Image: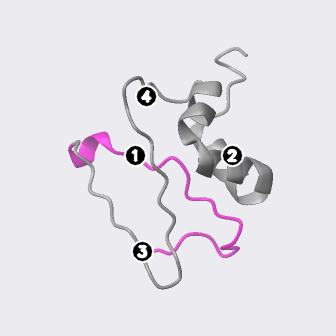
Amino acid sequence: MSDETAPQLGDIFDRFWVDEGFRQRFLKDPASVLLKHRLMDIEGMQVEIVENKRNKIHLIFHSDSPDKIHVVSNRHPRMPEGPATA
């Protein structure tokens, strides 16, 4: 797979919502999915997926400064009206 055809992280997040088998593999072993698709350099890192629930959300504060953080996907098939705006 060349860099031109490699999926982007947003593509992986989108697939997570529409492919139940992929979703289960990603939840079980996210590091191997990320490594297989060469999306991130996670050598020596632990990868954890945290799912928000109807009655519980998680706020994650990045260790990097805000100017180094970017959104990889704001598409969500369960939200047909698109992301909420402030």
Residue under circle 1?
70
Q: Residues within 10 Å of mark 1 (few under 14, many from 20)?
A: few
Q: Secondary structure at mark 1?
A: loop
Is residue 72 part of the magenta span, yes or no?
A: yes
Residue under circle 2?
25
Residue type, numbered disc 3: Ile
Q: Nearer the viewer, residue 72 or 36?
A: 36
Instruction: Using residue 12 as the reference point, say whether residue 47 is left or right of it.
Output: left
Q: Which residues are magenta?
A: 65-86
Residue type, numbered disc 2: Arg
Q: Nearer the viewer, mark 1 or mark 4?
A: 4
Badge 4 vs badge 3, beta-carbon distance below 8 Å:
no
Residue type, numbered disc 4: Ile
Q: Nearer the viewer, residue 65 or 50?
A: 50
Instruction: Using residue 70 as the reference point, say whether residue 13 is left or right of it.
Output: right
Q: Nearer the viewer, mark 1 or mark 3?
A: 3
Residue type, numbered disc 1: His
Residue under circle 4?
42
Dot 2 or dot 1, earlier in sequence: 2
Badge 3 vs badge 2, beta-carbon distance below 8 Å:
no
Q: Residues within 10 Å of mark 4 (few under 14, many from 20)?
A: few
Instruction: Using residue 2 as the reference point, say whether residue 54 is left or right of it.
Output: left
Give how far across and how far down residue 50 sits, in percent: 47, 60
Q: Is residue 64 visible?
A: yes
How far apart, in angstroms, are the residues tagged by discs 4 and 2? Answer: 17 Å
How far apart, in angstroms, are the residues tagged by discs 3 and 2? Answer: 22 Å
Q: Residue at x 44, y 41 (%)?
A: 47
Q: Nearer the viewer, mark 2 or mark 1?
A: 2
Q: Residue at x 44, y 24 (%)?
A: 41
Residue under circle 3?
57
